Image (cartoon, rainbow, N blue to C red):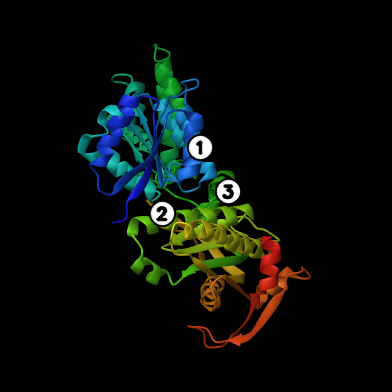
Amino acid sequence: MNRITVLLADDNLIVREGVRALLARDPDVEVVGVAGDYDELIARAVELRPQVLVTDIRMPPTFQDEGIEGAKEVRKRLPGTGIVVLSQYDSPEYAVELLAEGAAGYAYLLKDRVADSGRLSRAIRDVATGGSMLDPEIVSALVSPARPDGALSADEEDLLRQVAEGRPVKAIAMSRGDTAEAVNDRVEALFLTLARGASAGREDALRRLRMLHAAILEREEQGETLSRLLPGGLAAKLRADRGAADRTERLVVTVLMSDVRGYSAIAERSDPAALADQLNAHRQAMNAAILAERGTVMQYVGDAVMAVFGAPDPQPDHATCAVRAAVGMHAGQRELDASWAARGLAAFGLGIGLSTGEVAAALLGSVERLEYTLVGDTVNLAQRLQDLARPAGATVVSEATVRSLGEQSWDWDPLGSCAVKGRASPVVAYRLAASTRTEVAG
């Protein structure tokens, strides 16, 4: 059984052990370590690389918001780590602080309700897969304290509830049979109504509403859903250019595809829990290598990784960055393999394919859930070149990628014209020479 590994952080021993006992009843969750303050939280997270961090808000040394700040620091160092914040405070300020940069992989729950209907276990599962959860009491607190009795109509209350829940403006408009522009105007008018009510002694309500409004405006496309997961850099682009969400862009990029050779065979003979830990460490290492070269991780599919260089923002040296990222991915995997060998775990041999060319980039999906997607032959060719990247540890690139590199000192072994699945004509491909891979990695 694949168990989700959890690091539990709380300075209160009784609370910490109570949560540990609660999680021990869930066969799919394993608490692999505990921490009692900010420094220990960071150190244990780096050491154990858990899939999910469950943390209190206030911890030593200052008992302010170390839990939230620690969670953000863990996400910087270990991208993809799920975060569940447990709080005894139903004030929404903490939730807004936690989620202001986007909610994917974050949950905020009240401590006295974590056992209700397995809420904590559900939150751990949600954030482990990039989802999010906000305690219903917090959503209520975002709305209720701000409502001056009798000041809002039923329609206004419904609109405020949807805004507080983080629903996209477009989704609200569709549910109300209205345009996004009209809904945005009504939201602004609603906040003005509430502001006038603050003069009657409801300053705290107005302060909370301002924080909520600022967080919504700071998120992608004026209040996109809290559960949306966008590749790095895209949210900032949408904030700067709201119309980008509705456009399809033509970009010249380099697409990277990687795959673990013989993964099915490894899975067949491995302990599922150990394999899940390996896969999590593998993804973190691949993510780090890609981000180090300003790439965008598009998606993980099992043991496969897809990334792009040159999108969502144009990148003149996209081909160079992609090759360097591939070298870094192989180097990172070799380090993991060495550490795994000491534990008797199977190595992950990578095959990586790179393809350079034009793609169409767009947000595709529904009003409730969009995904940033690349479309075009360049994407398909990267997948086919990855199939050719053998033996394990090889990187195979397209002829267009080699041309884009220009006079740079990379050594290539020509593979000539290669037949690839799904294409009528062969493609000219090159394999990165072993000597170059070793020199760059060293």
Q: Which comes before the other along the chain, label 3 or label 1?
A: 1
Q: Which comes before the other along the chain, label 1 or label 2?
A: 1
Determine the secondary structure under disc 2. Answer: helix
Measuring from the top left, give residue 299's x and y in whole percent: 47, 59
Q: Amino acid at mark 3?
A: Lys
Q: What residue is pinned by disc 3?
A: 237
Q: Hey, which quadrant is residue 385 in on the image? A: bottom right
Measuring from the top left, give residue 374's x and y in whole percent: 52, 64
Pick whichever, 414 or 434, lies toward us: 434
Measuring from the top left, give residue 354's x and y in whole percent: 59, 70
Camera-nearest label, 3 or 1: 1
Q: Which comes before the other along the chain, label 2 or label 3?
A: 3
Determine the secondary structure under disc 3. Answer: helix
Pick whichever, 153 or 113, lies toward us: 113
Q: What residue is pinned by disc 1?
A: 43
Pick whichever, 329 or 85, lies toward us: 329
Rendered position, 428 above or below 258: below
Pick whichever, 80 or 413, lies toward us: 413
Q: What residue is pinned by disc 2?
A: 277
* Mark 1 nearby-residue class (10 Å; few <14, some 14–19, many ≥20): few
Q: What residue do we see at 47% from left, 41% from top?
A: 45
Measuring from the top left, give residue 288's x and y in whole percent: 56, 52
Q: Is residue 101 at least partly visible in the picture? A: no
Compute the Cα span from label 3 to label 1.
33 Å
Determine the secondary structure under disc 1. Answer: helix
Q: Amino acid at mark 2?
A: Asp
The label shown at residue 149 is: none
* Mark 2 nearby-residue class (10 Å; few <14, some 14–19, many ≥20): some
Specify whether 346 is left or right of 160. Answer: right
Rendered position, 437 above or below 38: below
Considering the image in quadrants, where does the C terminus appear? Answer: bottom right
Compute the Cα span from label 1 to label 2.
18 Å
